[in-house]
Structures are given as C-alpha cells and as structure tokens.
Image (spheres, grey):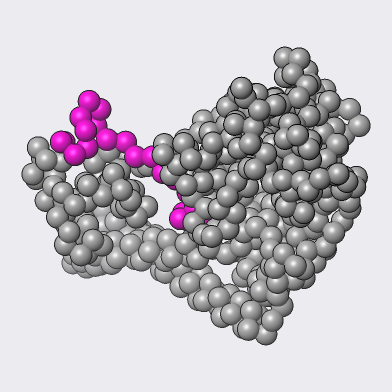
Amino acid sequence: MHDIKWIRDEPEGLITALARRGNGSPEAKAAAEKLVAHLHGLDEERRRTLTDLEGKLARRNAASKEIGQAKGQKDEERAARLMAEVANLKADIPSLESRVKEIEKSLDAELAAIPNAPLAEVPQGADEHDNVEKSRVGAARSYAFTPKQHFEVGEALGQMDFETAAKLSGARFVVNKGPLARLERALGQFFLDTHTAPEQDGIGGYMEVNPPLLVRDDAMFGTAQLPKFKEDQFAAIRFPPSESSFDWFRRCPEQRDEIAKLFAERLAGRPIVAILEGLQKKLDIEDFELLSRQFGGGEPLWLIPTAEVPLTNLVRESILSEEELPLRLTACTPCFRAEAGAAGRDTRGMIRQHQFTKVELVSITTPEKSGEEHERMLACAEAVLKKLDLHYRVVTLCTGDMGFASQKTYDIEVWLPGQGAFREISSCSVCGDFQARRMNARYRPAEGKGPRFVHTLNGSGVAVGRALVAVLETYQQENGAVTVPDALLPYMGGLKTIEKLK
C-alpha cells in the first residue's frame, strides 16, 4: 500500500510507476495522471474537512469553558450566546466526523487497489514474452524415447488418479497414492530440511513454522490478496454448531426475513430456500461473506493461497528491534486457489490445481538489506533444484508480468521434457514496504531513530506439486518406471525406483 504523503509530495513517482506497469504507453500515463489527480482531490478534501472538524472541536471545548466563566460572572446573556454557539457546533460536528470517515474509507480503498511500484532495474514489458533470462542451469536430457507428460507417467503407474479426485471434489484435484504419494511427501521434507539446515554459504538458516491454514480478512489484506484478488480465493464460513444451516434457517422465520432483505437486490428476490440450496452448489463470494458475518458468528475465514499469508503476517501490528532482523521463515503447507483467472489453462495434470502443497520462504528485513536478501532467497530456491539435478532457468519478470505486491520478481522455470517447455516452479519477490504498510509492521533502528516500516520478501522454495511434475518427467524411463533422484533416497525407505502397482 502506498503512502499518501509520498503521492502528495512526489506525484510523478506514482505516475511513472503505474505507467511502467502499463508498458509505458501514453494511455497508461494518462490514466495514472488521472488517478493521482483523483487521489490528490480526496486527500485535499480529507485534510480540509479534518481541519474544519478540529477547529470546531477546539472551539466547542473553548466555548464550553467560557460558559462556566460567564455563569460564574453572572453574565447570563453571554452564557446564552455561548450555549447557542456550542449547540450549533455540536450539530455540525457529527456530520463532519462522518464525512472524514467516509473520505478516509474511499481514500484507503483507492490506495489498496494500486499495485506496487517496480524498481528501476525491472525490465519494461507487456507480458511474459518480455521477461528477461538471468541465468540457465544444467541442460535438457536426451531420451531414447519420446518422453511423456507427468500425468501420462503417473496414470500409467496406477498412482495418479484424476477421475476419482473429480468424483470427490471436482476438476483441478488429484489423488496420488502408493510410492508416488511418498515421493511427493519426500519432496516437501527434503525442501524443508534444506532450508532449515544451519546456514552455510548463504543457504539455509530459515526457521520452520507450522501456521494456520485459515486466516482472517486482515491477514489476506496485509499481503494484498484482498480485496483485489478475492475471486481467486476460497472462503470457509461458520454456522451455529450442532445444527445444519438449512434446518436452522427454516426454524428462524425472523432471521429468514432479515437475510432475505440482505439478498433481495443481489439475488433478484430469490426465496431464502433457493439461497440455502445454492449453498450446496455455488454462491458468489460476497454472499458467503454476508451469510457468515450475519449468521455464522463473524467474518469468514480464508483458506491460504500460500503460506506467505500467515508467515508474513506474523509481524503484523508489531515493532521489532533491528537486532531481530532478518527474520527468515519457512513452511510446507497445503495451499488453495480458485484459479478464477485460469479458465481453460492447464486443465490436465497437476500444473494448476485448486489444492497443492508448497514450501514457502519469507524474509523480513530492513530497507538497506532487502535487495541482498532477494538474491539470497533466489539462491536458496535454486539450491534444492540443483540437488535434484533438474534443468532450469531464472527470468526477471518485466513490469507487465510481475505481481501486484512486488517491486521485483525472479521466476525459476524448470524444464519439463514431456511438455518440451520451461514452466514456473518458484517465484521470488521483494515487496519493499508495500505489505508492511498494510500490516503496520515496523522495526526500531539500532541508532535509536523512530520506527520504520520493514521490507518483506517471499518466494517458493519450491512448489512441491510442480517439483513432482518435474521429477516424473525428468526421471522417467522407457518402461514407464521413474528413478528416484539421489537427493530423495534418504526419504524413500530404500525405494530407488517407482514402478507400476501390481
């Protein structure tokens, strides 16, 4: 989230940043100028109204004291004038207070929707075709046969089942079993063990964390998943215990009427029974939120799209000492994404799933160290791929392809022989103080100056499901078996080759 003071003092900074994200086009710059002018207008109105409010509050307090003095001096006429003045002030103040809150809410909403400013060294570009290759490690293997894609390998082994997963949960889920399930677990353990090992040559030294998988609105807002990317999230709602939501609503006609009013406009007058039946199908996410807040005991909880959310928010609303930094945290968790923006993409296989496992790396550091920490995080993510002997490349994302909260992002793309293409397996981003402002996460510098916002970084270290994809395609044999990489042998209970289940 951007500092309105920075926008006020250096408007060209935000205009340039937004224009760069829009590929530097004249249209993008014009849109940025219009937005900045709008923000300036809101900010000026807020400051003007606040000044008016503070003036009236000060005058009310002063006049109230003067009333006592006038009465003490038996000056009833003056006391009456002052009382009338105070009455008028009291009548004006609530509307001014309400207006200040309204403007601040609008300004905060506008600021929350603005992406982070790219660093100067981020290459200019429109999309993934303009990303710049930074390095390439290893080489593509040669095969005496045509390599298959991972889902062909897994299904032929009888250990990767998309059909049963679809019966259980729908599209974009998978059931892995037997040695293949163990291989997936081994990858997660191997990644964690590598990252949590004592630091050596800039690798390791992360603290393992086992965080919640359900988080509140504030946590999702802090790392910028909300409000912009709400449609890509899954939410869990809570209803009163020991009662099904359907039966509960049926027995509470007064609450049925109340919720029907809430949904009347949104759902075009559909009866409450239709709404409840829709719970077993699909409701708009705002519907879920309204239901949960009104009748389920509070706000909905969000299933984490990545462990970045709980790990980064561990420092929300806190002031750290500089001696505590950098904080380096890692977790291996299930992750959940609705993939609302990925319709029609990677519909087969494990590349793009609603539920997947990922090892996340998060760093909290000072502004002076964040660039160095970014390079270190990238090296840590690369280290596990090198140990697996996988061919990959690192690309620097251009302005048009980088994430909303990022100042600069490196993607690691692993080579998939079955696809004959590089595919993303890790994304390492430095966010500056963008997330810290949303979380109010600060530190106190060693020299004793006032608190400053921390800088946050996050990266995949790496995506376990995509690593499984890469291992299956890279280590497949002509007979359909898969060789276990040497780095994973200690985790596989003596199993060196994964073969078809008998």
User: In which quadrant of the rendered view does residue 444 lie?
Assistant: top right
Relative depth, front residue between 419 and 271: 419
Relative depth, front residue between 431 and 392: 392
Residue drawn at 28 percent across, 44 percent down: 280
The vertical placement of 446 against 8, above or below, is above
Q: Note whether residue 238 is visible.
A: yes
Task: Please state, as top left, top right, bottom left or bottom right, where the C terminus lies in the image.
Answer: top right
Residue drawn at 61 percent across, 70 percent down: 8
The vertical placement of 12 against 62, above or below, is below
Toward the top, the furthest residue is: 493
Residue 300 colored magenta? no
Residue 436 percent location from the top left of the image: 62, 47
Residue 177 percent location from the top left of the image: 58, 27
- Report the side of 15 relative to 486 (left or right): left
The vertical placement of 154 against 450, above or below, is above
Residue 234 colored magenta? yes
Residue 89 percent location from the top left of the image: 28, 65
Residue drawn at 29 percent across, 65 percent down: 95
- Report the side of 424 relative to 93 (left or right): right
- Report the side of 181 relative to 271 (left or right): right
Relative depth, front residue between 445 and 431: 431
Residue 458 percent location from the top left of the image: 69, 44
Total labels: the figure holds 0
Q: Which region shows up in magenta?
A: 229-248
Task: Please state, as top left, top right, bottom left or bottom right, where the N terminus lies in the image.
Answer: bottom right
- Report the side of 283 relative to 270 (left or right): right
Residue drawn at 80 percent across, 66 percent down: 123
Q: Note whether residue 196 is visible.
A: no
